[in-house]
Amino acid sequence: MKKILTFIIFLFLCNLIFSGVNYKNKIDKRILRYLKLKDKVLPGGLRVANILDEESGMLDVNIKLKEKKFVIRKNSHLKRSYSKSLVPVTPLEVELFKENIERLDGEVFSQEEGNILVCRLRLNTLKNIAQSDLVQSIKLPLRAHKEEVTTEGVYASSADSIQPLIPFRGKQNVKVCILDVGFKGYQDLLGKTLPQNVTIKSFTPKEDIEKGDFHGTACAEIVHAMAPDAELYLVNISDYRSLKKSVDWIISENIDVVSCSLGWFNVGPGNGKDVISKLAEKFSNAGILMVTSAGNSGDDHWSGVFSDKDGDGFHDFKDGSNMLKFKAKADRLISGYLKWDDWVGYDEQNGLYGESTQDYDLFLYVEEAPGKYKLIFGAGKDDNSEQKVGGRSWPTEYYDDFFSTKEVNLAIKIKKTNATRNCRLDLFLDGIYEMSEMVHSGSLTSPADSKFVLTVGAIGYRNRGYHYYSSQGPTLDGRLKPEISAYAGVSTESYAPNRFYGTSASCPHVAGAVALLMSKTPFSAFDIVEILKARAIDLGVPGPDNLTGYGALMLVR
């Protein structure tokens, strides 16, 4: 028994010596750096790409397996004597290794020449996998030419089957405008994942086209991948005034399609009648199709009619408490937007509303100790939440400046301050997770609720599965939204090695698909919308629905 125990300890120490201790030497230094990166705070909802990459924790890698491995054997002719010898790795061992990856929630896509496995792994399993004595190295995929990077949505939508076709009375020089907040790094991608030449126009105060982050650049990459011959116009804005100016300029440039992966909170009741949707209507009247993202509020939205059963003035949630609880990760900017159904005096000409007569207040709390919450924002406490437009108070409250350097538990309360009726409430929280109560339906931002835009939801490019964050319809007046869904979690140079998630990634796939079909056929952009609805692959329950619309984007059936 003692000999057996000695042998087991010896094998364990050898395994540490020959694999575990030096596992970091097997991992590409770029991956090790990636593991240490801390997520940066990005503007508003645009940070969903980085957030979801961190939460899903997946990374595409190439694992090179050894052709031979060391084994420890006992020398039969000598007592307590062992030797190390080199033996070939068997096919069975490789198959068992692949099965182990899948058990660790990874994927093995293929086995290439040179004993290389093309995989997708969870970051928290890298150490475990690297410690195997079968592994020689784990590296990021080599990218010889950046211009060869193509979003997976091109193949998932069958756009690659349309691209080589000879045009039949198609429009030459289809113009697509990517309307965003910034196009950082776009010049480095010209002639690669972007066209050699693009038209740029900035409506920001300093006219800085690269203001913000890579969001707009990544969207432009996807449009170009879908419609390689389209002329791209990169236009960035900073607020409503700059957006309004940009609309007139875009119309003057005879643009065919606008791709806008942006959304606005608290500008209207959710029926497509507001200042942002009014600008979308202006595009439509000029013969320009606006394609927009549904929003990423599918899992951080709540709505309901105000209810105060205990008479304390605060809304009672389903669990009987006054608090809706949620969590925020470290180094995140947290925002909250509340609105209620007292939108009166709508001005059809400019999209503005009159003075609200019902008043509710929004309060934000942080948990200092288990079960003990401290007020950090609300009436009388750093409260600048009342939203006034044109000198009139709208039925909204918001906060957009909470930041914590550590993960925290938060909660909100909603108070009926000066109201004569119980209004329907809508709450949107941005930059948070694990809401104690949520309502997925009706979680659209503006202009996604407009009848003058084509609204796009998010699905996976492999299995066309609905992405949980994708905002859902219907609109407040009962219309279907989104109309179609497209692919997210795709590759771009702008976000590499991360993947580009969110309905922000889905939107340019559809805009690019419309531009591609315009260049190959005699149909208008609005005709093509109907074609795409008819060709979409129905998902979920039969028929159009408020989760994925008519289904997954598909150009060839």
Image: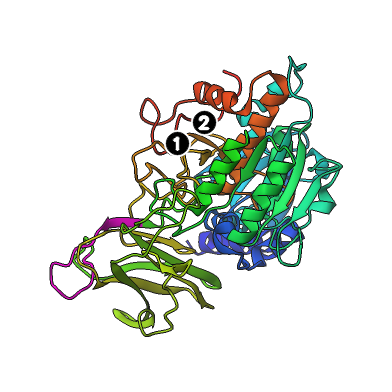
**The magenta segment:** 302-316
Quick check: is 480 in the magenta stretch? no
Which part of the image, by quadrant, shows the C terminus?
A: top right
Circle 1 crowding by C-alpha within 10 Å: few under 14, some 14–19, many from 20: many
Q: Which mark is residue 552?
A: 2
Amino acid type at circle 1 is: Thr
Residue beneath the point at 24% across and 71% down: 322
Q: Percent from the top left, x then y, of residue 496? A: 71, 52
Tell me how the rendering is colored: rainbow
Residue beneath the point at 65% across and 63% down: 35
Amino acid type at circle 2 is: Ala
Q: Mark 1 points at which residue?
A: 548
Instruction: Report the magenta stretch's main SS.
Output: loop
Of the pair 368 and 377, the residue shown nearer to us: 377
Instruction: Answer whether residue 107 is visible to the viewer in this image.
Output: no
Q: How many labels does the image show?
A: 2
